[in-house]
């Protein structure tokens, strides 16, 4: 991907882009400053608004997603909340897929409800059921595939149906990345990312981004971005630019390992099923486009706690998308109090699920790790 390797020349001709670590930008004269405040020119004013290193990251992701513009945030949740809040008002109804990322669910249940915005949750793999709920809704929120259950949505049909009914569509594209899924090209209005995942790829940054038409990003710039203040720092934008250089290579290596492991896991007597978008009979994701993480359902004779404790290469931890393999059992997330709007409890996620993120270690080493942990986890 030339876009990821190539940068336009900068004033110093440095091969890596400069980190413009400055909170503000100065003007030579009052007249220059007045002109800029009146909306002329593009010189940055203040880094809560625009910063050149952050802008470079925004431009690259916009181009990768095929969008006109993008706005970066200090987290995926910053991007998700600012995008949704730019679209809804009191009295609105949203439609959202079941098994949405748990903190997006908490945001909707705890904060949007206080703003008198209601959210209906529908199984996103049932396209007709989603379309049936669209009439009169303000927003349709998609995440394909969904967290934990890894269910995909028919983005094209849903985007078309939503547009016909005046419903704005958003899709969380963190899992597939623009390399494997371009929701805007399917007609979705806004794409959101937890850039903390694959775009970063090195588990050293928490960041987010929203991509869409200039008009939709302008609405975010006008209504939410400057005031919620969840801006991305220049240093983290630089780390993201560096991480993205190897996005295609990382993804294809991880994808190959996921292919090996998921096929073997499906045959393993300790595993009841493998939840991965490429493995279902109605899969909309071609096998070669599968990513990580994915979920396994353990057989009743395997203890998820013992299994995860026995793993050595797969480290216990949240998040995913980095170079290191990670594991988290659903019992951990289910243990969070129900009073905080627990998506896993509310969407009936069972206790025998384990989510695996496959990193850049050798697939055979990872397989040995899984195999020995299954042995030790027998009840
Ligand atoms: C699918 C998905 N979307 C959004 C987020 C939120 O992103 P962040 O943690 O960068 O706020 C996450 C984080 O785990 C996620 O997995």
Image (cartoon, grey):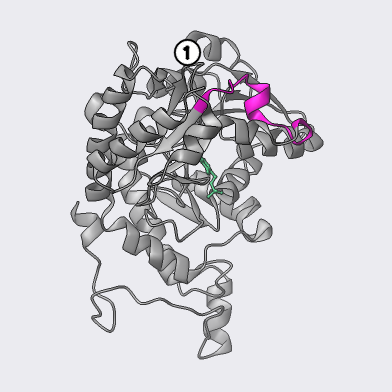
Report the front residue among 312 and 324. Answer: 312
Q: Please state the total of marks drawn on the protein image.
A: 1
Picture coordinates of residue 47 (x, y %)? 55, 71
Q: Is residue 198 visible?
A: yes
Picture coordinates of residue 155 (x, y %)? 41, 24
Q: Which residues are magenta?
A: 338-353
Pointer 1 local density, CA inside 10 Å: few below 14, some 14–19, many at least 20: some
Residue 239 sits in which quadrant?
Answer: bottom left
Q: For this view, does 162 lie left or right of residue 136?
A: left
The relative height of residue 253 versus residue 290 in the rendered view (above or below) is below
Picture coordinates of residue 162 (x, y %)? 51, 21
Q: For this view, does 367 lie left or right of residue 276?
A: left
Q: Does the segment drawn in magenta span residue 230? A: no
Picture coordinates of residue 334 (x, y %)? 65, 30
Q: Residue at x 53, y 48 (%)?
A: 76
Q: Residue at x 51, y 19 (%)?
A: 124
Q: Is residue 294 visible?
A: no
The relative height of residue 305 versus residue 323 in the rendered view (above or below) is above
Report the front residue among 341 and 13. Answer: 341
Q: Residue beneath label 1, please?
A: 127
Q: Does the segment drawn in magenta span residue 345? A: yes
The relative height of residue 287 versus residue 89 in the rendered view (above or below) is above
């Amino acid at each position: 991907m030339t876009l990821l390797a190539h940068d336009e020349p900068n004033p110093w001709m440095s091969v890596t882009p400069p980190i413009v670590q400055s909170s503000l930008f100065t003007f030579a004269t009052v007249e220059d400053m007045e002109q800029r405040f009146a909306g002329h020119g593009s010189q940055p004013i203040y880094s809560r608004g625009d910063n050149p290193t952050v802008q470079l990251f925004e431009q690259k992701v916009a181009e990768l997603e095929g969008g006109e513009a993008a706005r970066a945030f200090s987290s995926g949740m910053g991007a998700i909340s600012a995008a949704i809040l730019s679209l809804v008002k009191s009295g609105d109804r949203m439609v959202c897929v079941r098994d949405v990322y748990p903190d997006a669910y908490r945001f909707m249940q705890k904060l949007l409800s206080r703003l008198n915005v209601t959210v209906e949750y529908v199984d996103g793999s049932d396209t007709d059921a989603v379309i049936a709920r669209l009439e009169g809704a303000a927003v349709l929120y998609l995440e394909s595939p969904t967290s934990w259950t890894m269910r995909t949505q028919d983005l094209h049909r849903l985007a078309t149906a939503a547009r016909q009914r005046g419903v704005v569509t958003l899709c969380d594209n963190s899992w597939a990345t623009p390399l494997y899924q371009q929701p805007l090209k399917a007609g979705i209005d806004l794409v959101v990312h937890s850039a903390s995942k694959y775009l970063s790829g090195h588990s050293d940054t928490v960041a987010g981004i929203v991509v869409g038409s200039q008009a939709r990003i302008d609405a975010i710039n006008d209504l939410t971005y400057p005031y919620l203040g969840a801006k991305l720092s220049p240093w983290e934008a630089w780390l993201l630019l560096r991480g993205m250089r190897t996005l295609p290579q990382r993804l294809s290596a991880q994808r190959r390992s996921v292919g090996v492991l998921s096929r073997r896991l499906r045959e393993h007597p300790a595993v009841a099923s493998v939840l991965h978008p490429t493995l279902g009979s109605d899969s909309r994701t071609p096998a070669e486009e599968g990513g990580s993480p994915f979920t396994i359902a353990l057989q009743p004779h395997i203890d998820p706690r013992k299994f995860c404790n026995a793993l050595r290469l797969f480290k216990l931890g949240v998040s995913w998308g980095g170079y290191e393999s990670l594991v988290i059992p659903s019992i951990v997330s289910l243990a969070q109090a129900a009073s905080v709007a627990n998506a896993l409890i509310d969407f009936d996620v069972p206790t025998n699920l384990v989510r695996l993120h496959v990193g850049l270690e050798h697939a055979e080493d990872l397989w040995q790790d899984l195999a020995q942990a299954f042995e030790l986890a027998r009840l």
